Image (tube, rainbow, N blue to C red):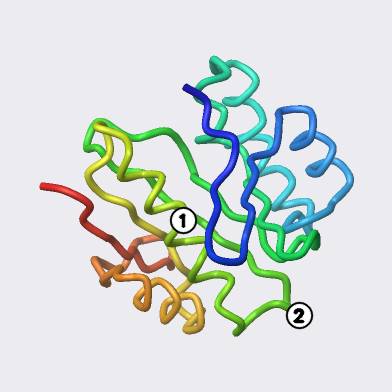
């Protein structure tokens, strides 16, 4: 079944279609602000999404959160659930909407969606070591620091079910 909307108190969070994601990536909109980000999205989102069945697209695409019709953030999953029953989340809040609770709502909405799947027991996030605001945001949402990673990121985790 394809999920096409997450609702929170203030947000409507909608996944982009493949065509919408292609347009966003190639027009450098949303969180795509450099050639490096563009190349990463092409490699890790667009290519796998193009070859995946439509019911798996939600795991590859960006989800756009709207508040009163205005885009406030981009979030989503890094890939489908792993064999270890883990999904990884990301959230990128536009500067003018930071520190207003939107990131918290979006993360909690993605976590709530994840709990509906039998093949997901954990959600995690990779956060830059110096991104203290994102670290606090995920901690506020019930994630705990798991480990430092070799790529300069910190891994945060949340247990959904054992």
Residue 23 spot, x, y in % from top left: 84, 37
Give whichever of 82, 138 is nearer the camera. 138
At 51% from the left edge and 66% from the top edge, which residue is drawn?
105
Residue to which mark 1 is pinned: 109
Give whichever of 93, 9 is nearer the camera. 9
Give whichever of 104, 18 is nearer the camera. 104
Tell me the number on the disc at residue 68: none
Label 1 crowd bin: few (<14), some (14–19), many (20+), radius 10 Å: some
N-term mark: 2 or 1: 2
Taking 135 as reference, is 28 left or right?
Answer: right
Q: Quadrant of residue 119?
A: top left
Q: Quadrant of residue 96?
A: bottom right
Residue 37 spot, x, y in % from top left: 70, 52
Tell me the number on the disc at residue 96: 2
Q: Residue furthest right?
A: 27
At 26% from the left edge and 49% from the top edge, which residue is drawn?
122
At 79% from the left edge and 35% from the top edge, which residue is drawn?
20
The Cα–Cα distance between marks 2 and 1, rounded to whole angstroms, is 21 Å
Taking 160 as reference, is 68 left or right?
Answer: right
At 41% from the left edge and 45% from the top edge, which residue is drawn?
113
The kind of secondary structure element at disc 2 is helix
Taking 147 as reference, is 20 left or right?
Answer: right
Mark 2 vs mark 1: give the one in front: 1
Q: Residue furthest front?
A: 9
From the viewer's perspective, is residue 28 above or below residue 54?
below
Label 2 crowd bin: few (<14), some (14–19), many (20+), radius 10 Å: few
């Amino acid at each position: 079944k394809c999920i096409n909307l997450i609702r929170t108190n203030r947000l409507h969070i909608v996944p982009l279609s493949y065509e919408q994601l292609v347009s966003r990536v190639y027009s450098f909109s949303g969180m795509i602000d450099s050639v490096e980000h563009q190349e990463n999205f092409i490699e890790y989102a667009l290519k796998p999404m193009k070859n995946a069945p439509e019911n798996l697209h939600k795991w590859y695409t960006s989800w756009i959160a709207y508040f009163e019709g205005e885009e406030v953030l981009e979030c989503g999953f890094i890939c489908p659930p792993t064999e270890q029953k883990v999904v990884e989340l990301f959230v990128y809040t536009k500067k003018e909407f930071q520190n207003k609770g939107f990131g918290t709502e979006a993360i909690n909405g993605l976590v709530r969606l994840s709990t509906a799947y039998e093949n997901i027991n954990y959600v995690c996030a990779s956060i830059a070591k110096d991104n203290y605001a994102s670290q606090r945001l995920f901690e506020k949402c019930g994630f705990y620091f798991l480990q430092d990673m070799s790529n300069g990121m910190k891994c945060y985790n949340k247990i959904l079910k054992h």
